[in-house]
Image (tube, coloured by chain):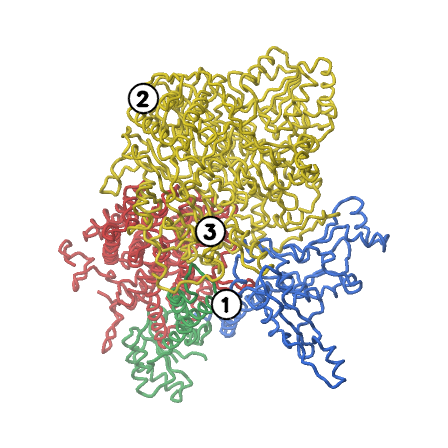
Chain colours: A blue, B green, C yellow, D red
Amino acid sequence: MAQIFDRSSNALARMSLVLTGLIVISLGVTLDQLQRSPWVTRQGQRPDQPVPFSHKHHVQGLGLQCQYCHTSVEKSSYAGIPPTKTCINCHSQIWTNANLLEPVRKSWATNESIVWTKVHDLPDYVYFNHSIHVNKGLGCSSCHGRVDLMPLMYQQNTLQMEWCLNCHRDPAKNLRPVSQAYNMAWEGPSKEKPVWCSVSDEKTGKPTAQSVDCQTSEPGKVEVASLSMAGITLPTMANYTKFTSQRELGNYLIDHYKIRKPNELSSCEVCHR
Amino acid sequence: MIAEFETPSDLVRAAQAAYNDGWRRMDCYTPYPVEEAAEAIGFHKDRVSLLTLTGGLMGLCAMFSLETWISTLAYPLNIGGRPTYSWPAFIVPAYEWTILFAGLSAAFGMIALNGLPSLYHPLFNAPNFRTGATDDKFFLCLEALDPKYDASGTRAYLESMGPNSVVEVEY
Amino acid sequence: MSSEGGNGMMRKNEEQKALTLDQVRTKLEGVKGKRYWRSIDELAGTPEFEAAVAKEFPDAAAEWVDPVSRRGFLKLMSASLALAGLAGCTKQPDEPIYPYVKQPEDLVLGKANYFATAHPFATGGVPLLVKSDAYRPIKVDGNPDHAYNLGSSDVFTQATLLDLYDPDRSQHATVRGTTTEYVEFLEAYRERLNAGKANGGEGLYFLSTSFTSPTLQRQWAEAQKAYPKAKLVQYDPALAGTAFAAGLNPQFSLDKADVILALDADFLSGAGYPGFHKLTREYAARRKNPAKGMNRLYSVESTPSTTGLKAEHRLGLRASEIPAFAAALATAVGVPGVSAPNYSWSAEQTKFLSALTKDLKANAGKSVVIPGIYQDPSVAALALAINKALGNIDATVSLAGEASTSGDQIAGLKGLVADLNAGKVDWLVMLNSNPVYDAPADLDFKTALGKAKVSVHLGSHIDETGAEAIWHVPAAHYLESWSDVRAYDGTVSVIQPMIEPLYGGHTAHDLIQAMLDEPQTSAYEAVRSTWKSTISKGSGADFELGWRKALHAGWIEDTKYAASSAATAATAIKVPTPSSKDAFELIFRPDPNIYDGRYSNVGWLQELPKPVTNLAWDNAALVSGATLTKLGVDEGDILEITVGGRKVKTPVLVAPGHPDNSATLHLGYGREAAGRVGSGAGFNAYLVRTSDAPFYTTGTAVKVEGKWGIAVTKSHFQDLRSKVEGGDGSGTHSLEANEAETRGVIRSATLEEFKANPGFANEGEEHPKVERDNTLFANWEYKDNAWGMSIDLNSCTGCNACIVGCYAENNIAVVGKQQVRIGRNMQWLRIDTYFEGDLAAPKAHFQPMACQHCENAPCEQVCPVGATVHTPEGINTMVYNRCVGTRYCANNCPYKVRRFNFLLFSDFETESLKLMRNPDVSVRSRGVMEKCSYCVQRISEAKIEADKENRAIRDGEVVTACQQACPASAITFGNINDKTSKVATLLADERTYSVLADLNTRPRTQYTAAVLNPNPELAEAPVEHAPAKG
Amino acid sequence: MATKDIKPEDPRIDPKTGEFRVLAPGFTFKTVTAKIADIVLTPTTSLGWFALFSVGGAVATLVIVAVTWLFLKGTGIWAVSQPVGWGFAIINFVWWIGIGHAGTLISAILLLFKQQWRNSINRFAEAMTIFAVVCAGLFPLIHVGRPWLAYWLFPLPNTMNVWPQFRSPLLWDVFAVSTYATISIVFWYVGLIPDFGTMRDRAKTKFAAYIYGLLSLGWRGSVRHWVRYETASLLLAGLATPLVLSVHTVISFDFAVAVIPGWHTTIFPPYFVAGAVYSGFAMVLTLAIPLRKFYKLEGLVTDRHMDNMGKVMLTTGLIVAYGYGMEVFMAWYSASHWEFFMMWNRMFGPMGWSYWMLIACNIAIPLTTLWVRKWRTNMTFMFVMSLIVNTGMWFERFVIVVTSLYRDFLPSSWGTYRATKWDYMTYFGTMGLFTALFLLFVRFLPMIPMNEIKMMLPSAKITAKAKPAVGAGD
């Protein structure tokens, strides 16, 4: 009886065994990466919109406030998409016959909605509430990115559960003074750019934002400067605390904004009902 | 150079003799486990058991630490008022993984240590090997790599042990 | 990405709410799919089709016939596609946003608005506060500020929401079955009216349900001036022939009553009885704190009702015996000039009578006798006389002023039919009524209707009458239109529309107004002008201001009936003699769930287990166990009931405590043109109901072949166990109830026992008090809020309002009869009914049972994916989108309150239903477990508001849907960590116990044990009744 | 055990021991190889095989139909409802797994106990195990409401940062069963390797030789390999033993850990394991008896095996009976109302018939008759008996799952259970699947381990001095 396999087969057999192992592993890794990829999360995609609306132009260029259009962001779960009227307010005066704005004029004339495509589209079983975030010192840019630099709107972050939890488990790293919520360029305090905060009368039944006062310029500096010429130095206002790192500021705001504990924030019913 | 024997006893004696005569690069081939033959050629201990033990321990630690991490650190949740570190509940999966890992390491360890798969092997060139070795014949093989080996002498030596036949195999 | 695609649609609504109503309407008409389903539905309705199906798939046939699962059945393909998609984890489709063009000022999208209005129900208006999400009404609840119901509601009121969004509502005017426009009709109508001017409206007839709206009454009065010969007939099948319809509407106030006698009056089980909300509240209020004394309720009734079963003492009499009994009582308490027909009362009955008499006399002035409205008018008169004799008038009874006076409705209808047959009727306009279906059988209205030259039907559906009438005009729902209505106490509420008519419906106001000088005047203007004087008068109030105030508050000041003790002239009361003891009596009652049939197509109500019987999706001939034996039938068998040659086939069901030798038939079923839900459910009791005996009569019943698959949601067996086996050996008691008591599920005591031993509810080894420190592992700490609920079993009357409220709040699916039969109904909240003692004369315990939110929840521990977990506030929360559906939690739940979506139960297709859903609650898809969440969406909302204002949640800020609906305020919810909160004090009460405490599950929902206040004279064991098979 | 009921000159008896022979006399290495290998290597397949296989296949398609419909409509097509949330799916799962156990028991435990007689039957017993586990494993997967998410039961990294919940016995099942399946397959394959070698060398066609060659990994019977091989299989046996005991223990936890009366009991683990072995051996008999008939293997699978398996069944049957007895006793002795009512309801409630069915099939019939040796060696009797016991054990699971659930704590939520045609289709479908797989095994793999049989031949004895090689064994 002769050989069934020739010499090479040994090497082949062992190779193939090893290969199978490798393939299985790499498959796993690929899938794990895939579920986080923009292809799934839609990060950075710019869907076709009836009007190529530029946040960059309106926010950075014209300096419109976020709430000018997204009126209910502080009051409601739903930030609000501006009605055609909001557009017409200005565009009945300027660019009155730009082709780009045809859909707007049409809508205004026919009383039919402009049909936009949702960019930040959470899964339907997720109940997100804008108002509580904005009122507790979370800025627009923390989730939506530098909208003021977006000619066409796109989704900055994954909006996946792990991303939400990332903050709900440690809010300190993203909190900012409520007064800064709409400041797109806010970067948080640093050695170079410290932040000073003080707490006025904290009594319940009053929006937390009002009881904490933060500013980016050293309080009372002005006077100090002017007077120091005369060789007198005044102490800076005592009740202001100086923050040079996001962590410190975050913890401070957690205390004074009465942010709930991570275990409460990461409890299921907070987002799913 | 392989010699074919009819019964296990013959093989064992032959092997014993060869071993005593100082042969080392040698092996026996039988259709079913013949421990005596293994002893005869001085093969006693193997490392399969050790592999299995380590495998088992790995499984145990892997699963138990995974469970602990998940329920106390990764996402601690209040499950029906139970403590997050409910070790009694963690025992079962850890136990299963111990066995799983141990079992797999035993099997694959054995295969690896035996240098399998070796689909090709010179012995298969021997005309009578494949008809017998896995059926009812018993083979003693003295390899050319052994210093005592020389074609004619070894043949004579094997002949002297009363095999059915002696064949020289191309390496 | 998830199977909550359903709630995908939810989400879309949140943007679509921005759709203009025109768009919504076009959507509703336009949707191809919808037409398709409709046509399939129609096809599937036909008998040939069903026969064919039955041949094809024998056991699937049921599914096809069953309207709800038929839908599911047809959706199969789409479902499977969806599944494929999900399996492939495809990405969500792009979702569109429809912003407003001009957004209303006061609208904040995502925040609900609340508007006051009222539900014009036949027995009186129910003041409402309606939750509106972007101008879509999504929840109907009582008006908390209104003195009448203080925010409570009832099954009908709650269900009108689904009635509004019913996809089967008629959407076009039709003439002879072909679609047309309303204007077409208006033209013809105006023509006729102008022609009629000359002869004073000769031959012009109107048939309507009772005019509850003062404005409508005013409009008619004016119309009558213009058209003196025009005739209006009012007919409410459930009320025609009652003293109430005839105008007798005394006001009872139970808060001052120590002894209450209900003479066949079921005032605790639903809005069917005038003043239900107030009466129930006042009744319950006197039972909340037994230590401070409580009232005593006697009930003499002809069919078991929650009222009778709650009563300390209940006497079951055949309907015809009750007038005689009332007369006997009257003479006993010394009412002059009453001749009680002599009748041989049994020992038990005599005993009851004497004890009752004594008690009433002893409590003269502090007692009240409440007559049943479905009784012979003499009962009402006698009750009044007795109350007068006892000096209860103006103490516990006040004789109200002008009540709804629609005269003798039956006589009116008879007259109309006579005129029809005589060919006198030229035009017959039928307003919101369905006489072809519900007119007395002997009148044969259908043929008569054919004799009218022109017949017009204004109705919400193309129902039996709509199909017969020449013209059909879609009616606007009360949530779509302006009107007004009087509450029980006469207070007027303005009904304001919550949404533009979905299908361009119109109201009776429009049709009557058309007869007047300025036919164009809208209902809005009409209502305003009705009340202009009332609102303007007094302290020179500005009308506009007053009007806005009235709209905001929900009622118009000083419109209560003036209490006029101008007693009715003591005319000799004629008391009918009871039918002979061996005559088989039939009792007709409007159905507790779908009333006279007007709610047949409301799935929530069809699926709602009826009080006492727990029967869903059907009506049945309710009989006593003994009668069942006598008739030689079993439950579910079919009886043929004959009344004067008219026959109807009915299923049989035992109602514990039903008087022997009589059967109760509920009206409202057996509809042929109700819609996809109501058509074909139950049997039509109107077929044997005649104009001379609208509420009870005598007839015969014989067994016929076949079985009627009835869906009873709770098992009921007789306890036939010997003492050794753990039974009581009587063989006449209920197995479930006996078990419930041994297991400490139900705990109760008499007032004496309670006084002697206030801690009775937590004693003995089966009833241990929860030992918090008796644990293997450290207790979990609940620091901030800890939500808990207390349910007062003494107050709960089992009226079901809470269940329907829960349906509306939590987007609960309707599953259909077949599914209910195999125990798959989805109610998160159920009312467990246990019949204590001899099933022939039982007492009942009603126990609302929903998720108990156990701190040591057995369900959570066994979920392999952690889809049900505890929140830091102690809520046992169910994460639908994490659930894979192993059903292990449901198995391991000792209270069996978890509900599983075995099939695709939620309706993701029907457009109109999407508008109805609560946007804050996921619509659960197939294969997902669900259960009571303590209305977590409301808690979250309150938390967010509180956090924004940097304060703690106030006690009473979070109100669960069931709590809100409950007329007896038996349910209290709140934070048990706050020791001052209402719920905390209640849970601390000695009578409070937790069900199955010995399992140490530590429920957050706990119950307050019932205390009864029996009359010592009647306290000892009642007479034995003949044992019967159940 | 006494053998007086059988005449000593009966050829089946081994004169030395007075026991039945494990192997019929007259076998040599060669004949063993020939006998076993040729069943597989014959180019012609018997019509009987085809007939049976097509029947099995046909029945197996039921499963495909039923499961497709299930995935389209949802678990609602089954009879599961409130309060009976688990039905046929879990019953069949437990039943199949139980059957599997005998295989591992024979191959592992008996190996450890050096019960040589197991050598002839362990191979197909193991095969039975694997196919049973395949059928069993199907059920937990399809019984969930959203099968496409079943992978959430495995601890895989994901973007939700959520993980399985390790306190759930259901999750323990996942690990127990998956481990069990893996180890059984590995053990089985390891056992096959040398025989694959033999097959390779006896294969008549190049193709067969090639395939078997691959599968044998080039096994050549070096004694060094044999030593390692022996250690490995001994270790695997040593591991499989605690595994097999744990698997049904864990499955019994599904019930024992729950609070439901009738589930919540500590006796379940031992009683489940015993029950598993009981039904398992029954199934081995159901398979072995026809096999040895068709393939004339009476010489290798002798009456000794039948006799022993009968004894094992008797023993385990008695343990199971003790379990039932204990349940009843505790119901009374514990003075717990839950237990008492549950027992009363099981026996005399609306579904009492199922309880009496199980008593009849598992206790009344087998435990009275299996004592008689003559019957234990009567094939027809044993075959019938094995079927009865399998039915009985199925009913045991039915009783545990259904009659505990349909009337539990709150009387108001009591219900009932009536299986639908889809339930039955799925159940019988898996039987077909099992049959089909098993027939494939019989056709293409050596159903008896040749090397282990050879070890048992007298000629395998190592003797001091050479002995003329003549037909060994007599």
Which chain letter goes with mark 1? B
Image coordinates of residue D88 in percent, x first then y, are: 40, 47
List the single residue furthest toward the top: C422
Residue annotated with mark 1 = B74
Q: Are marks 1 and 3 on the same chain?
A: no
Q: Quadrant of the N terminus of chain A?
A: bottom left
Q: Determine the secondary structure under disc 2.
A: loop
At label 1, the amino acid type is: Ala
Residue annotated with mark 2 = C345
Q: Which tag, 3 or 2, sits closer to the chain's start? A: 2
Query: Looking at the image, do the residues carrying marks 1 and 3 touch, with CB atoms under 8 Å apart?
Result: no
Residue annotated with mark 3 = C982
At label 3, the amino acid type is: Lys
Query: Looking at the image, do the residues carrying marks 3 and 2 touch, with CB atoms under 8 Å apart?
Result: no
Viewer-nearest of discs 3 and 2:
3
Image coordinates of residue D18 in percent, x first then y, are: 16, 61
Which of the pair C536/B148 is nearer the observer?
C536
Disc 3: CA contacts within 10 A as few (<14), some (14-19) or many (>=20): some
Relative side of A209 to C242, left or right:
right
Q: CA distance from mark 3 to mark 2?
A: 48 Å
Compared to residue C728, the image places residue D192 above or below, namely: below
Q: Are marks 1 and 2 on the same chain?
A: no
Q: Determine the secondary structure under disc 3.
A: helix
Image coordinates of residue C602 in percent, x first then y, are: 54, 35
Viewer-nearest of discs 1 and 3:
3
Q: Are marks 3 and 2 on the same chain?
A: yes
At label 2, the amino acid type is: Trp
Viewer-nearest of discs 1 and 2:
2
Task: Answer with the quarter of the image where residue A155 lies.
Answer: bottom right
